[in-house]
Amino acid sequence: MINVSFWNILWTVVNLLILCVAFKHFFFKRIDNIIVKRQEEAKEIYDKAEEKNRQADEYVKQYEDKLANVESEKKQIILEARKTADGQYQKIIAEAQEDAKTIHETAVAEATIEKNKIISSAKKEIADMVVEATAKVIGSRTGADIDSQLFDDFIDKAGE
Amino acid sequence: MNLAEELIEELNCEAVFTLHLGSIEIPVMESVVVTWIVMGILIPLAIFLTTGLRTQNISKKQACAEFIYEKLTGIVGGMLGEEAKQYTGYLSTVLLYIGLSNIIGLIGFKSPTKDLNVTLALALMSIILVEGAGIYQHGVRKWLHNFTEPVAIVTPFNILDVFTRPLSLCMRLFGNVLGAFVIMELLKIVCPPVIPAVFSLYFDLFDGLLQAYVFVFLTSLYIKEAVE
C-alpha cells in the first residue's frame, strides 16, 4: 500500500506522458485546428462581404456621378442647340434681309430705268410737240406775235 | 480478522506480471495496468470524437467534442491565466486522467490513484512543471532570486515549498481516495444495501472528481505563481 516503487513511478510518468501527447495530438490540436480554420473561413466570408459592400458603394458613386454627368450633359446639349438655333436664326434673318435688300434694289433700279424711259419718252414727246407747235406758229405768224403765240402754244400743250 | 484481511488485500497493489529486460526485472503493478485501461478508454474516445471534424454543419459528435474542449480549456486555462496558457493541454489531460481514475472503482477496477506511487508520480511531474515553468519564464537567475522574495528570511521556507508542495499534492489525493475507499468498504459491511449507494455518490463520484479538480487547481495555481 505505502511502498514506494521506482518502477511504478516510472511507469506512471511514462503512461502520463503518452496520454498527454496522445491527447494533445488527437484532441486539443485537432479541435484547435478546426476552430482556427472556422475562424479563418468566417473571416474570409466577412472580408468578402466587406469587399462586396465596398464595390456596391463604388458602383453607387459611379452611377451618381453618371447621373450628374447626364444632367450637365443635357444642359450642355441644350445650350449648344440653342446656340446653333440662334446662329441659324441670325443667318436666316440676315439672308432674308439680304434678299429683301436685293429685291428692293432691283425694284429701285427697274423703277429708275422705267422712270428714265418715261422721262425720255416724255421728253421726246415734248420735243415733238414743241416742234409741231413751232411749225404751226411759224406757219401763221411773224415777229413778236410768233414769240408770244409760241409761248402760249407751248403752255397749252404742256397743260394738256 | 476477515475484514482487515479483505481491506489489506484491496489496498495492496500487487505486481500483475514482470517484464524481463535482460537482467533487469520490471514489475508491472495493478495500478499501471488500470492506468492502461484508463488510457484505453480516453484515447480512443478522443480519437472517436475528433474524427471527421468540419467547419460548418457540425455533427452532434463534433458539437460534443467542442463542448468538452471549450469547457476543459476554459476551466484549466482560466485557472492558469494568460501567461501560462501553454500548459493547458497537460493539465486538462491530468484532470481527465485523475477524474476517470478516481471513479473507475465504480466499475470494479482498483483506482490507480489508490496507489501512492501513482499520486507520487503525478505530484513529481507537477512540481517539475511548476519549477520548469518558472525557469522557462524568468531564467535561472531570476528563478533562484525568487526564492528570497519577498524577504530574505523566508528563503528556507520557499526552498521547503519545493518539497512540501508535491508531497501535499500527492498525499491529499492519495489520502482522499484511500479514505473514501475505506469508508465505503466499511459502510458496505456495516449497513448494506441501500445506504452505501447513497454515500457512494459522494465518496466515489463527487469526491473523486473534486479531488481531480483540486489537484489540477493547485498545480495551476503554483504554475501561475511561478510565471508571475
Image: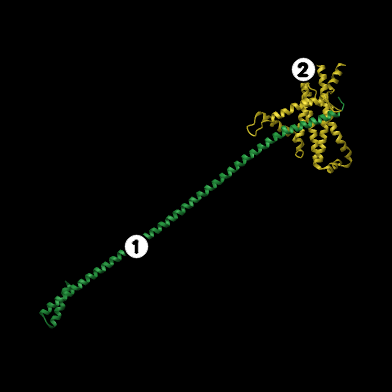
Q: Chain of mark 2?
A: B
The kind of residue tagged 1 is: Gln
Residue B194, numbered label: 2
Q: Colour of chain A?
A: green
- Residue visible at 44% across and 54% down in the picture: A78
Letter of the yellow chain = B
Give the x, y percent position of residue A74: 46, 52
Which quarter of the rendering shows the N terminus of chain B? top right
- Taking depth in this image into account, of A111 and A20 the one nearest to the observer is A20
Asked whether the viewer can see residue B36, the reply is: yes
Q: In the rendered image of this protein, does residue B224 appear above or below residue B98?
A: below
Asked whether the viewer can see residue B150, the reply is: no
Q: Residues within 10 Å of mark 2 (few under 14, many from 20)?
A: few
Q: Quadrant of residue B113?
A: top right
- Residue visible at 18% across and 74% down in the picture: A126
Q: Which residue is mark 1?
A: A97
- Taking depth in this image into account, of B199 and B136 the one nearest to the observer is B136
Per the image, label 1 sits on a secondary structure element best described as helix
Q: Chain of mark 1?
A: A
The kind of residue tagged 2 is: Val
Q: Is residue B176 left or right of residue A98?
A: right
Q: Quadrant of residue B59?
A: top right
Q: Quadrant of residue B147?
A: top right
**Tag nearer the camera, 1 or 2:** 1
